[in-house]
Amino acid sequence: MKELYQCTKGYRLYAILAPLTIILEVVLELLIPRVMAKIIDVAIPAQDMSLILRLGGTMVLMALASLAFGVLSGRFASVASVGFASNLRGALYHKLQDFSFSNIDKFSTASLVTRLTTDVTNAQNAFMMTIRIMFRAPCMLIFACILAFRINSDLFAMFYVAVPILALTLVIVMTQAFPRFQKMLRHYDDLNASVQENLAGIRVVKAYVREDHENEKFARAAAILRDNQVRAENLLIITMPVMMFVMYGCMIAVSWFGGIDVIEGAMQTGDLMNYTSYIMQILSSLMMVAMIFVSLVMSRASISRILEVLREVPTIDDTDADSALEVADGSIDFENVSFAYNKTDVLHDVNLHIASGQMVGIVGATGSAKSSLVQLIPRLYDATGGSVRVAGHDVKDYPLHTLRNAVSMVLQKNVLFSGTIEENLRWGDADATMEEVESACRAACAHDFITSFPDGYRTDLGQGGVNLSGGQKQRLCIARALLKKPKVLILDDSTSAVDTATDASIRAALRKERGDVTTIIIAQRIASVQDADQIIVLDDGQVTAVGSHEQLLETSPIYLEMYTSQTKEVG
């Protein structure tokens, strides 16, 4: 398959050398019994010690050469398979970077982790067996059959019975095992999901003393996985007993009928030993072929899951975009915009105009599609109807890199990465000076708490910023967005974890320093948006009112109700 072949790039020479050296190993292994037969049938009866020593020395050299080729083949196959797995894992990861939010929503995070780890490992093992054993076994089988047939064609007739038995067994295994392994891997996803969810929410688990519940949930997932593994493996375990039965049956037949031929003078002792060696090699080759098919059945399920990701077409692309187009300003227009998520309508016929440099607030009840609306601006999702325009151009006309560089967005979930505070902030601008970094942090009211740490901006955050409070994470994310110097700044409920005084300070700093940046603030608190140039009220995916704070108090019942309830709470 083209997708998998591309992943051998850089390691194709090793992938070629592995089967070549294994073939040389097989040839030498097949010649050794012939030399042994000559010693038994010619040198020993003639009592020619020099011939025995020469032939014996030849056997030793052939054995050492065969060993060397076998070692080289193993080395080449290992390098090729590890390189293949590395490229495949990289291809998967790079593909994920091109996915839109809707593509990512299609696959669970746990499933993608399983595909990048367990499934890639299975594919790696299958690749190594393919370039090594899949060449060794057929070569050994074909050459050994030819040599054995030449020695005694009558004895070879036993394989007319043995081979159909083995073939039937493999057909049954291949056709029945694949769906079982597919189901087993889906339960691997469920197990990983349970572990991931528990580790991500371990503080909540402990706060609510739900360790026993989580243990039970994990035990159920592990038990279901175990049962499916057993069901899949039960079909495979019949392979080895059948192989051993056929192998020992053939050995008994060779010993019985070959012994009779030796007694009757129809066959020499050396030829019988030679024939026995070839029979052993034929049977071991058949066993290796069976192992290959079993491995391929197991890996086929993994490979199909890998290809499912590699063949997934990103729902958002910029192949038709104008590469020279730049975002001139921060004006935004929604023209008859509709949006559906998983075939469920979320936004309906939205029409909005936001002038460049305005500060805009968006309010509404939970589930009113506030986040969905702003995610259409940087094309995290694409509108299913109508058009979204930035600086007078449809967002689809811009290269994604250009558009998203002009739009800074602080999502509801504050995501920080392993590393220092400074390294996280420089995601906004890797080339920013330290003065610019500090200026952005001051605007986000983050500078004071950063400098309170012993290491200041070089404080290590740990995974996900575990040593910071929710409010501190929010302020760092805002500072990171400001450092990007965008044309459009979107704050999606990004000050919910800070106190009202800090919230007011951040808004004042944004108004003072944002210049001509269009700022969109989604908030639950009316106080966070009441000084905005215009406020948008959303309800059930529709814009119900647009205006200033004073205008909405008079014209929007929804806004008035929110303001009244929050004023009472404060009072």
Image: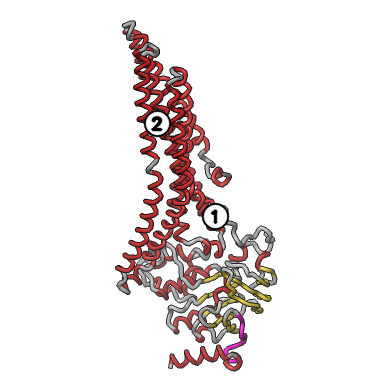
Asked whether, in this view, residue 253 is left or right of residue 97, the answer is: left
Q: Residues within 10 Å of mark 1 (few under 14, many from 20)?
A: some
Q: Can residue 180 be found in the magenta stretch?
A: no
Q: Earlier in the sequence, mark 2 or mark 1?
A: 1
| Residue 321 visible in the current orientation | yes
Between the residue at mark 2 and the residue at mark 1, the CA separation in whole angstroms equals 41 Å
| Residue 82 visible in the current orientation | no
Magenta region: 542-551
Q: Residues within 10 Å of mark 2 (few under 14, many from 20)?
A: some
| Main secondary structure along the magenta-highlighted residues | strand
Q: Report which residue position mark 2 lands on.
A: 284
Q: Amino acid at mark 1?
A: Lys
Q: Residue at x 47, y 18 (%)?
A: 150
Asked whether, in this view, residue 84 is left or right of residue 46, the answer is: right
Q: Residue at x 62, y 63 (%)?
A: 402
Asked whether, in this view, residue 510 is left or right of residue 242, the answer is: right
Of residue 422 and residue 15, the one placed in the foreground of this image is 15
Q: Residue at x 38, y 15 (%)?
A: 261
